[in-house]
Image: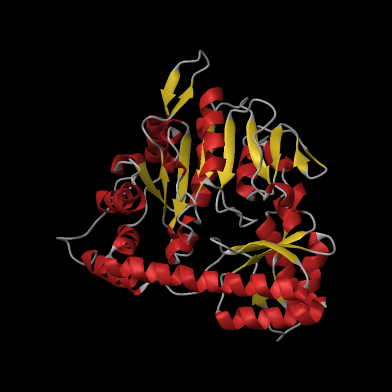
Amino acid sequence: MIRVNENYLKLKASYLFSDIAKRVAEFEKKNPGKEIIRLGIGDVTLPLPPACIAAMHRAVDDMASAKTFRGYGPEQGYDFLREKISEFDYRSRDVSISADEIFVSDGAKCDTGNIQELFAHEIVIAVPDPVYPVYVDTNVMAGRTGVNSDGRYSGLVYLDSTDANGFVPELPGEKVDLIYLCFPNNPTGATATKADLTKWVRYARENRALILYDAAYESFIRDDNIPRSIYEIEGADEVAVEFRSFSKTAGFTGTRCAFTVVPKKCRAYSATGEPVILHQLWLRRQTTKFNGVSYPVQRAAEAVYSDEGRRQVRELGDYYLENAARIRNGMKDIGFARYGGLNSPYIWVKGDRDSWALFDLMLEKAGVVCTPGAGFGKCGEGYIRISAFNSHENVDRALEKMSEALR
């Protein structure tokens, strides 16, 4: 008799975005021909920057010649990309992260889900609420939680993020070992100040804890006073792992390229309290379970850091931020409180009914897909997340339809 991993049976029936896709598909089947505007899942709609396309074409040509062909590449990424990341994302901001501390991967979602494999089963984990579901679900799968009751899993420490604290959670009232943070935040769009992050770094250092810092949306930050990396905080390189992605930065959601920074100063501990270098563990994990990102994709990602690439990526971000501003203004005109959308592509809207009811109303009356806040946790109930990833024209049309449906 082959037995399953029963921790999977604790999970909700389906992943949040799979559930949304199913509901939308059912609606389309019942309403053939009706226009649907998708402002739910955080998928980009504009094409890759021309600099990336040109670099990818050149790399494909390389694959056509025996002299320039590339087979298996280094699991941690090619040096040409890692060096560019180190130079432009860190050293240019006076942050000392070397190329060999950077691990190129096929997505921040994968890395944030996989890195929990490095840690002991009995650690105490803190997650924000609302939260990106992958942080929670992968720890459920690993058996670190009990059952889900009233929207929360026993065994986790939940950090409430509400309008009262600006959706930046307070430090936990109990000792925890592993802390998930995401800024600019998915789903609330909130950003953290240097003072906010300094408190968390200090907590981690004092408690020998580790911060998993998801900075997938840092490229949307336009305020120079907001940190783009947790490593801008002194001492963070000893207590934090950072995740970034080219998905939203440069439209690589379908192309797949991201990276994780594991500083060599970063430590976890053995059962006897001896320090263990996390960099070595992650390198071992990746070389065993991952074959690397393809050469053409990494060349395309490298082009993000060219003069043309940086200009084009900035224009992409500005386009989506303009959408965010339009959504913020439109939801205010309709009469809803809204948060985020500044230095972030997500707008967090406080509704007048429960999340799924508002989702259904938006879909059925306006033909607009959003994301119900309850899918991100208990504190998300009563909210919806609206994504700025679409065209200006679709955003304007969606706002018109929502206004008609909600007034």
Q: Quadrant of residue 14?
A: bottom right
* Quarter of the image with the C terminus in it: bottom right
* Quarter of the image with the N terminus in it: top right
Q: Quadrant of residue 295?
A: bottom left
Kindly give the residue lying farthest to the left in the view shown: 67
Residue 333 in percent (x, y) is at: 73, 76
Q: Residue at x 75, y 77 (%)?
A: 402
Q: Residue at x 36, y 32 (%)?
A: 264
Query: Is 216 placed above or below 399 here?
Result: above
Left or right of 84? Residue 121 is: right
Kindly give the residue lying farthest to the bottom in the view shown: 33
Q: Residue at x 49, y 74 (%)?
A: 319
Q: Is residue 6 visible?
A: no
Left or right of 72? Residue 187 is: right
Kindly give the residue lying farthest to the right in the view shown: 353
Query: Is 375 placed above or below 10 here?
Result: below
Residue 234 in percent (x, y) is at: 43, 35
Q: Is residue 165 visible?
A: yes
The front one of 374 and 64 is: 374
Q: Residue at x 37, y 39 (%)?
A: 287
Q: Quadrant of residue 323?
A: bottom right
Residue 226 in percent (x, y) is at: 49, 52
Residue 208 in percent (x, y) is at: 53, 24
